[in-house]
Image: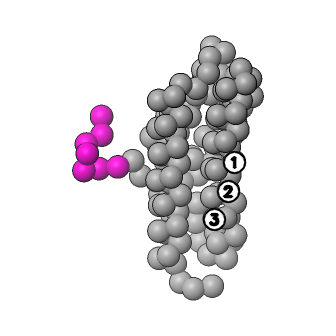
């Protein structure tokens, strides 16, 4: 369980490492990451509400892959639960899961933007 003084974190440096430290490539990936987290969240909610649980699970699976690239372990764990619910159990994403997912994605976006600010100018 997390303490009030700590927050789930991600490590955007892992993505930079994955592109062999190429800051230009990393800078190109950041907008894609930011947009994907918004779009896939919207799809998860939409599919959940529409009863399209397999599609919801697929979106959670895809977003989980993105979260893995930045070491967002708490986010990955939640996405695994949503994926399992959609693909295996055929249940919707709960309101609590959606709320937590939104929060964790926002934290990951903030981490990404903060890390981007530490890099040398283009």
Q: Position of residue 4 (x, y in %)?
A: 25, 45
Q: From the viewer's perspective, is 24 left or right of 69?
A: right
Residue plotted at (62% across, 75% down): 23
Q: In the rendered image of this protein, does residue 70 appear above or below residue 79?
A: below
Q: Nearer the viewer, residue 1 or 70?
A: 1
Q: Which circle, 3 or 2, is nearer the viewer?
A: 2
Tag 3–tag 2 contact (CB < 8 Å): no
Q: Nearer the viewer, residue 106 or 115?
A: 106
Q: Quadrant of the C terminus?
A: bottom right
- Residue stretch rendered in magenta on the structure: 1-7
Question: Mark 1 Cα within 10 Å, few/some/many (few <14, many 20+)?
Answer: few
**Residue that mark 1 sits on:** 39
Q: Position of residue 99 (x, y in %)?
A: 49, 37
Q: In the rendered image of this protein, does residue 42 appear above or below residue 37?
A: above
Magenta highlight on residue 80: no
Q: Quadrant of the N terminus?
A: top left
Indicate the quadrant where residue 90 lies: top right
Judged from the image, the secondary structure of the residue bearing numbered disc 3 is helix
Indicate the quadrant where residue 64 lies: top right
Q: Which mark is residue 35?
A: 2
Q: Is residue 71 visible?
A: no
Q: Is residue 94 visible?
A: yes
| Residue lying farthest to the top in this orientation | 89
Closer to the chain start, of discs 3 and 2, is 3
Q: Main secondary structure of the magenta part?
A: loop
Tag 1–tag 2 contact (CB < 8 Å): yes
Q: Position of residue 27 (x, y in %)?
A: 64, 72
Judged from the image, the secondary structure of the residue bearing numbered disc 2 is helix
**Residue that mark 3 sits on:** 30
- The Cα–Cα distance between marks 3 and 2, rounded to whole angstroms, is 9 Å
């Amino acid at each position: 369980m997390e303490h009030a003084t700590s927050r789930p974190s991600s490590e955007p440096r892992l993505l930079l490492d994955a592109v062999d430290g190429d800051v230009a490539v990393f800078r190109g990936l950041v907008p894609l990451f930011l947009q994907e987290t918004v779009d896939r969240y919207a799809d998860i909610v939409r599919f959940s509400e529409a009863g399209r649980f397999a599609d919801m699970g697929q979106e959670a699976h895809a977003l989980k892959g993105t979260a893995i690239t930045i070491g967002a372990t708490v986010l990955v764990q939640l996405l695994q639960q949503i994926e399992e619910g959609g693909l295996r159990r055929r249940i919707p994403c709960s309101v609590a899961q959606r709320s937590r997912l939104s929060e964790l994605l926002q934290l990951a976006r903030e981490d990404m933007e903060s890390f981007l600010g530490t890099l040398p100018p283009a």
